């Protein structure tokens, strides 16, 4: 029995030593084997690896692309218009040895602080450099600016053992205190546009009305002209007819027309004649003419 | 448990639906005829050893009062039971299912070995570990949504003409390469979000405000999709952007009233123009009518005048013919007839020349000519009679 216990104890110890001397490096990480803080070996490839139990320890670092968002900073491009800019970086730990040496036990957190400082510097430097105005940032050249930031940040982050995969600007906004001014300007622009619209509408309306009025006068006066011509022709025709008919015997016409005129002008009850019976009509009123 | 279940199943063994429960019973049986026997044996041995340690410890305490006779069978039973439990546990840890919308990535000792297909998969723990990733399932990131209420929220973006536009959009994505997704990115959704926001801001920064609000929306969506996809491909992220939808591209709340006023002004302009058109139509129609009326009136006048003239002329001609036949008589007759007609109807006062006091004009100045008219209409008539 006793031997069995000893045997079991030895077996357990062996198992423990075995388990603590192998470690698995995941596809997603890289590992450093440290011996009393000194780097003994680097495991960059995934798989099984070994270390000396108790003396050596394993430090694992993420081998995936890590992200870092920088806080918003105000930058002043060369045209002195301030912009609030923030960015994010995508980076991975490229050289674990250098990374360990640079950040020590602080690990990724400390690396993020350092990288954040680098990014802020680089962003300020690139966006504040000669020839970069706020208009450049707010244009399609933004992509090339981002490339410059990335290249520059990558060069500096190399010292940390980091590989900056990408830096992209996120917001490039106006500072809060300029926002109201911008809104006011936008409003003013819209108001101008609205006023312009209405003015143009009134202009068009007035033009249409004026044209209509003009056409009315033209149409009516044209018709008036035509009608006068027609009336004139009618009068001329009448005169011609009369001249033709009456010209046959002007003397009788005079007599006949006068009679017609008497009849027309005196008919009705609105005339009162004061006459003497001396006229031809009353010839027989006084005298029967039989004498 | 296993023994209890075994009884009824054994009895119903002749029935056709044996396959279902048999499937669940399968895993414990399968290792027996599968090539993994050495591993399992190894593990069973390991488990047995550990159990022995445990049993031995406990046995030492409980062994005193009970005596040594009971121990061997007791221990053996416990050990077998423990082994079966361990085996079950191990199988439970080693088998996993992959649903149709998922993919699994298997790591052999931490190293990428294979992609598991949908169905039941076997990854012998602890040598192989598996990560199941939903690949076809669409995931979405809403950007700019809900935060645009406060000014300076992440929906507000600056355009190239230094205007501010409030953009909400949604990026829908899934995973097209589970291994890349797993091994290259620490934070997939967050990366999609950040890249999308950056891409949209970059695109907006290159554009003017006015077209963004309406006709450029489609182009922006397309460009954003391409840019996000390219950036993510640059990270070898294994992410595929399914679509980008632009939910909102509006002026910010602070100025939206002004934009609405512009729309109102556009409508007002339209209204003014239409009103003017209506006026023009009305007035022109009136004018055309009036013109036609004047022309028709003139034509009517022509017809009337000419007809009257012709009538009068032919009447005259007729009378003239008659007159020429007997001039004297006709002339007198006409005269008398006319005066008959005229004097028959007219109020008349006949003053004989001799009836006056002296001279023809004696009476005339004294006649109340005005009063002779209507008020005393009867008097002359009676006088006439």
Image (spheres, coloured by chain):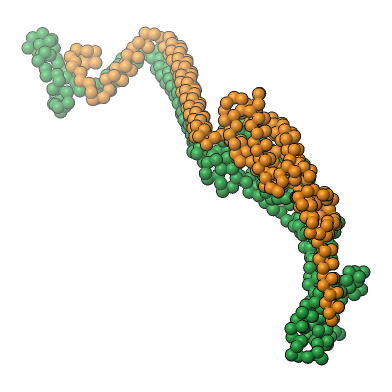
Chain colours: A orange, B green
Q: Which residue is drawn at 78% across and 85% down?
A: B4
B376 with respect to A118 (left or right): left
| Above or below, A270 relative to B43 | above
Q: Is B257 displayed left or right of A70 in the figure?
A: left
Tally of marks: 0
Above or below, B253 relative to A145: below
Of residues B103 and B332, the one drawn nearer to the viewer in this rendering: B103
- From what the image shows, is residue B266 above or below residue A108? above
> What residue do we see at 43% from left, 9% from top?
A247
- Pinpoint residue B145: horizontal percent, then vertical percent: 59, 47
Residue B295 x, y percent position in the rendering: 47, 23
Query: In terms of image quadrants, where is residue B326?
Result: top left
Indicate the quadrant containing the C terminus of chain B: top left, top right, bottom left or bottom right.
top left
Q: Which of A239 and A117 is in front in this view?
A: A117
Residue located at (46% from left, 21% from top): A217
Against A143, residue B195 (above or below) is: below
Q: Which of B287 and A246 is in front in this view?
A: B287
Q: Position of residue B349 (x, y in %)?
A: 16, 19
- Image coordinates of residue A89 in percent, x first then y, are 69, 41
Can residue B269 be seen in this snapshot?
Answer: no
Q: Which residue is drawn at 66% across and 30% down?
A: A125
> Which quarter shows the N terminus of chain B?
bottom right
Please indicate, yes or no, whether residue A51 appears anywhere in the rendered image: yes
């Amino acid at each position: 029995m006793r031997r069995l216990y000893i045997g079991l104890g030895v077996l357990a110890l062996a198992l423990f030593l075995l388990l603590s001397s192998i470690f698995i490096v995941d596809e997603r990480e890289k590992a450093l084997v440290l011996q009393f803080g000194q780097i003994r070996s680097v495991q960059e490839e995934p798989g099984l690896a070994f270390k000396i139990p108790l003396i050596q320890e394993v430090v694992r670092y993420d081998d995936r692309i890590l992200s870092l968002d920088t806080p918003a900073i105000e930058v002043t491009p060369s045209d002195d218009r301030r912009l609030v800019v923030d960015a994010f970086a995508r980076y991975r730990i490229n050289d674990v040895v250098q990374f360990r040496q640079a950040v020590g036990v602080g690990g990724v957190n400390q690396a993020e602080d350092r990288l954040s400082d680098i990014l802020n510097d680089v962003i300020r430097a690139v966006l504040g450099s000669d020839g970069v105005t706020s208009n450049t940032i707010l244009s399609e050249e933004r992509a090339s600016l981002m490339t410059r930031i990335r290249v520059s940040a990558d060069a500096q982050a190399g010292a940390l053992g980091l590989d900056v995969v990408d830096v992209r600007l996120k917001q490039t906004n106006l500072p809060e205190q300029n926002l109201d001014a911008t809104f006011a300007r936008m409003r003013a622009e819209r108001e101008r546009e609205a006023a312009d619209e209405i003015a143009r509408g009134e202009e068009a309306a007035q033009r249409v009305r004026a044209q209509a009025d003009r056409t009315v006068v033209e149409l009516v006066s044209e018709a008036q002209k035509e009608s006068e011509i027609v009336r004139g022709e009618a009068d001329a025709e009448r005169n011609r007819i009369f001249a033709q008919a009456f010209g046959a015997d002007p003397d009788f016409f005079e007599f006949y027309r006068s009679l017609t005129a008497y009849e027309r002008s005196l008919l009705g009850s609105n005339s009162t004649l004061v006459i003497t019976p001396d006229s031809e009509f009353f010839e027989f009123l006084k005298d029967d003419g039989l004498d | 448990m296993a023994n209890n279940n075994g009884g009824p199943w054994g009895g119903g063994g002749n029935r056709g639906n044996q396959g279902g429960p048999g499937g669940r019973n399968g895993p414990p049986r399968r290792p027996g005829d599968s090539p993994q026997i050495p591993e399992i044996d190894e593990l069973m041995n390991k488990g047995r050893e550990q159990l022995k340690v445990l049993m031995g410890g406990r046995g030492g305490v409980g062994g005193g009062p009970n005596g040594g006779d009971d121990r061997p069978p007791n221990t053996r039973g416990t050990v077998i039971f423990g082994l079966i439990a361990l085996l079950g546990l191990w199988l439970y840890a080693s088998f996993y299912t992959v649903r149709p919308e998922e993919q699994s990535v298997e790591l052999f000792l931490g190293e990428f070995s294979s992609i598991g297909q949908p169905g039941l998969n076997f990854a012998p723990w602890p040598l192989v570990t598996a990560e199941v990733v939903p690949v076809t399932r669409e995931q979405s990131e809403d950007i700019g949504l809900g935060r645009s209420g406060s000014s300076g929220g992440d929906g507000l973006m600056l355009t190239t003409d230094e205007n501010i536009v409030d953009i909400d959009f949604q990026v829908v994505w899934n995973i097209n390469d589970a291994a890349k997704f797993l091994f290259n990115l620490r934070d997939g959704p967050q990366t999609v979000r950040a890249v999308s926001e950056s891409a949209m801001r970059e695109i907006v920064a290159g554009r003017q405000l006015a077209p963004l609000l309406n006709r450029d929306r489609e182009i922006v969506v397309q460009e954003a999709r391409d840019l996000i996809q390219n950036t993510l491909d640059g990270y070898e992220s294994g992410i595929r952007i399914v679509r980008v939808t632009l939910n909102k591209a509006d002026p910010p709340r602070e100025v939206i009233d002004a934009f609405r006023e512009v729309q109102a002004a556009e409508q007002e302009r339209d209204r003014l123009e239409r009103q003017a058109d209506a006026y023009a139509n009305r007035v022109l129609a009136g004018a055309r009518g009036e013109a036609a009326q004047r022309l028709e009136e003139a034509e009517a006048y022509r017809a009337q005048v000419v007809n009257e003239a012709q009538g009068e002329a032919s009447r005259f001609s007729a009378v003239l013919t008659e007159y020429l036949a007997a001039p004297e008589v006709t002339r007198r007759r006409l005269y008398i007839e006319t005066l008959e007609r005229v004097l028959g109807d007219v109020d008349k006062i006949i003053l004989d020349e001799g009836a006056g006091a002296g001279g023809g004009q004696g009476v005339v100045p004294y006649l109340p000519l005005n009063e002779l008219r209507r008020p005393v209409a009867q008097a002359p008539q009676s006088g006439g009679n």
